[in-house]
């Protein structure tokens, strides 16, 4: 595989990571925090309704965790394709 094909493969992996992580963020922030909040409020998480929790803290916590996951995934991908920085 030549360098141009490697970079295209690298970019496809990167876009796939971004798409999956954004879908997760959408589900947590929009669907769980807005659309399904009434159904989720039937359950409790540390004494608070789950829908309330997602709307107020869950989306932000999930977003921070997704950033960490993205960094880990990209560091692995960078090493795999030899484009990492020291």
Image (spheres, rainbow, N blue to C red):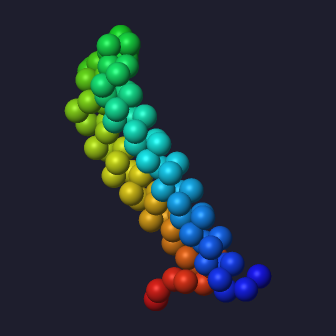
Vertical arrangement, residue 46 with respect to residue 75, above or below: above
Q: Is residue 44 visible?
A: no
9 left or right of 30 in image: right
* Residue at the image position 26 percent from the left and 36 percent from the top: 57
Q: Residue furthest right?
A: 1
**Residue nearest the viewer, comparing 65 with 28:** 28
Number of labels in the image equals 0
Q: Position of residue 79 (x, y in %)?
A: 59, 78
Q: Residue furthest left?
A: 56
* Residue at the image position 31 percent from the left and 28 percent from the top: 33
* Residue at the image position 65 percent from the left and 70 percent from the top: 9
Q: Residue furthest bottom?
A: 86
Vertical arrangement, residue 83 with respect to residue 76, above or below: below
Q: Position of residue 25 (x, y in %)?
A: 40, 42
Which image quadrant: the N terminus? bottom right
Residue 48 sits in quarter: top left
46 left or right of 75 in image: left
**Residue nearest the viewer, comparing 66 with 5:** 5
Q: Is residue 36 visible?
A: yes
Vertical arrangement, residue 11 with respect to residue 67, above or below: below
Q: Position of residue 62 (x, y in %)?
A: 37, 44
Vertical arrangement, residue 51 with respect to residue 61, above or below: above
* Residue at the image position 32 percent from the left and 44 percent from the top: 61
């Amino acid at each position: 595989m030549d360098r141009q094909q490697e970079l295209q493969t690298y970019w496809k992996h990167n876009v796939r990571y971004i798409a999956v992580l954004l879908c997760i963020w959408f589900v947590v922030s929009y669907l769980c925090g807005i659309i399904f909040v009434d159904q989720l409020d039937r359950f409790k998480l540390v004494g608070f309704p789950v829908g309330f929790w997602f709307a107020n803290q869950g989306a932000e916590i999930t977003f921070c965790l997704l950033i960490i996951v993205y960094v880990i995934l990209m560091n692995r991908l960078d090493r795999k394709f030899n484009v990492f920085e020291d």
